[in-house]
Image: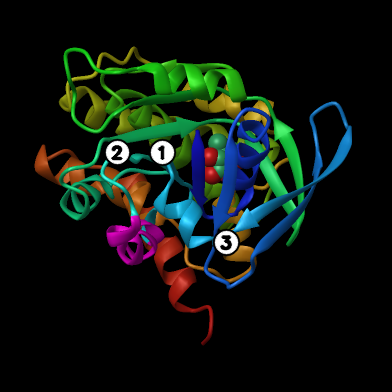
Amino acid sequence: MKITILGAGAIGSLWAIALQPQHDVQVWTRSSITRYPLTFQSLSGKVRTYCFDANHIDHLQQSDLLLVTVKSFQVITALHPLINDLSARCKIVIMHNGIGSHDAVKQLFPKHTIYYATTSHAALKTAESTLRHTGLGQTFIGPLSSVISTDNSIADMFNQALSPCYWQDDIMEPLWKKLAINCAINPLTAINQCTNGELANEGYQAQLIQICNEVTLVMRAEGYRIKNGELYQQALTVIKATADNYSSMNRDVFYQRPTEIDYITGYLIHQAKIFDIAVPVNTQLWQTITSMESSYHA
Ligand code: PAF
């Protein structure tokens, strides 16, 4: 397959490396580079250097797959200039933290096959062209609208590249479960400028439980069967599995970049309003991150 990966951040770069043995992969970036060199350290510590093509319009126009790995709030701005260059058969896979870009993506590409994906693989860009795979995870992929049956070979392709990858008829369910983990980990690690692992300390447990209980109420209202304590346990598992990592929101606040808060906690608050559910702890976290962002350049 000819593949273009839109966004050469940590997750986009990780998939570029995973897909390149079997596919013809280029990256698409905001800059005008034509080659993207990357030094990669695998989970076993092995270091290898790669060099990808970048920003070749003919490769984009011939692509069978466009994998979009930019941040949630960048999806539409990044996709807009590409509308007329994607062939009608090009499948689009969107992979970002949080929920909320799907309606705008559907409007932008009404005739294309669109999938959403979520991954818990952890990767860290330690410099512009240095990437470290820091945690093994799993990936879920499924169509934008729930369908009875559709071509799920795309999940096999992702599974061969970086396993495990599972097909999901209702991709919203894993997206919500990942949203719960991000609601729990991201704001707290950003506000307290701590690693994910530090959230395992006793002092954070009451807050983590409250955050997850609020997400549980909204997810149940959305129709998902969530057991008491399930989301908290899942968040704790990720906290322990990624203990040494700084979350993406922690890094965004550290480097004074915009965060994905509106697509994570903000999306939860938006949906909670629809069902008239109070989510005071998450609302407080959303307010704190939002005011931290607005004071960046003060
Ligand atoms: O946003 C992130 O950093 C990741 O989604 C997660 C799972 C919180 C691990 O750091």
On the image, the x and y values in percent for residue 208 come to 48, 34
Question: What is the x, y in percent for residue 248?
Answer: 58, 50
Q: Is residue 82 magenta?
A: yes
Disc number at residue 252? 3
Callout 1 amino acid: Asp
Name the residue nearer the viewer: 144 or 284. 144
Crowd tier of the residue under label 1, counting other residues whose Cα lies within 10 Å: few below 14, some 14–19, many 20 or above: some
Question: Rounded to the nearest whole Å, what is the CA distance between mark 3 and mark 1?
Answer: 32 Å
Residues at marks 3 and 1 touching, judged by CB atoms closer than 8 Å: no
Nearer-N-terminus badge (2/3): 2
The boundaries of the magenta stretch are 74-85
**Furthest-right residue in view?**
46
Q: Which residue is mark 1?
A: 64
- Using the numbered discs, state the Cα–Cα distance from disc 2 to disc 1 in whole angstroms: 7 Å
**Does any portion of residue 195 appear in the rendered image?**
no
What crowding class fits label 3: few (fewer than 14 Cα within 10 Å), some (14-19), or many (20 or more)?
Answer: some
Instruction: Give the SS element for disc 3.
Output: helix
- The residue that disc 2 covers is 89
Residue type highlighted by circle 2: Arg
Q: How is the image coloured?
A: rainbow
